[in-house]
């Protein structure tokens, strides 16, 4: 295996695991195909909206609250739209939640000596 391939492999596993560690939604969405991830995000967005309506009660929302709600929904949908750009290895490490520590290739080579 070329050095580049090994470095790319290590970086992809590290990035996927770190994303999943930071936000569990990445781990959830990575389990689905692209279309299902988007459908799941749409359902999660509907859940966010309904919870917001329930919390609002009889009060009228102000523009700031509406903007914050829209931002949350866009963020939810945006996470699902990220998956077509990822390599399978990154998705797999997201699902697994791989949080191994990233060691630069040169440093790992020195420790083997």
Image (cartoon, rainbow, N blue to C red):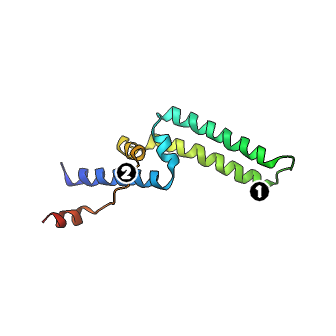
Quickly name the residue at label 2.
Answer: 98
Quote the CA–CA distance across marks 2 and 1: 38 Å
Pick the residue in front: 3 or 33. 33
Q: Position of residue 20 (x, y in %)?
A: 45, 50
Contact? badges 2 and 1 (CB < 8 Å): no
- Residue 8 appears left or right of 80: left
Q: Where is residue 83 in the image (x, y as percent from the top left)?
A: 47, 42
Quickly name the residue at label 1.
Answer: 64
The quarter of the picture where residue 102 lies is bottom left
Q: Residues within 10 Å of mark 2 (few under 14, many from 20)?
A: some
Q: Position of residue 84 (x, y in %)?
A: 46, 40
Q: In this view, does 46 lie above or below 61?
A: above
Q: In this view, does 62 lie above or below 89?
A: below
Q: How crowded is mark 1: few (under 14 residues within 10 Å), some or many (20 or more)?
A: few
The C terminus - image quarter = bottom left
Label 2 residue SS: loop
For the view shown, which residue lies furthest in the left direction? 113
Q: Position of residue 60 (x, y in %)?
A: 86, 50
Residue 3 disc label: none
Q: Which residue is drawn at 33% across and 54% down?
A: 11
- Residue 11 appears left or right of 20: left
Q: In this view, does 52 lie above or below 106?
A: above
Q: Which residue is drawn at 39% across and 45% down?
A: 96
């Amino acid at each position: 295996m070329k050095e580049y391939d090994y470095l790319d492999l290590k970086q992809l596993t590290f990035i996927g695991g770190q994303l999943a560690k930071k936000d569990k939604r990445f781990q959830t969405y990575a389990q689905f195909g692209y279309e299902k991830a988007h459908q799941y995000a749409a359902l999660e967005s509907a859940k966010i909206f309904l919870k917001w309506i329930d919390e609002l009660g009889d009060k009228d929302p102000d523009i700031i609250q509406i903007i914050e709600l829209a931002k949350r929904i866009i963020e939810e949908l945006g996470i699902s739209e990220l998956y077509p750009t990822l390599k399978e290895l990154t998705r797999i490490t997201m699902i697994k939640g791989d949080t191994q520590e990233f060691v630069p290739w040169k440093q790992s080579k020195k420790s083997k000596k």
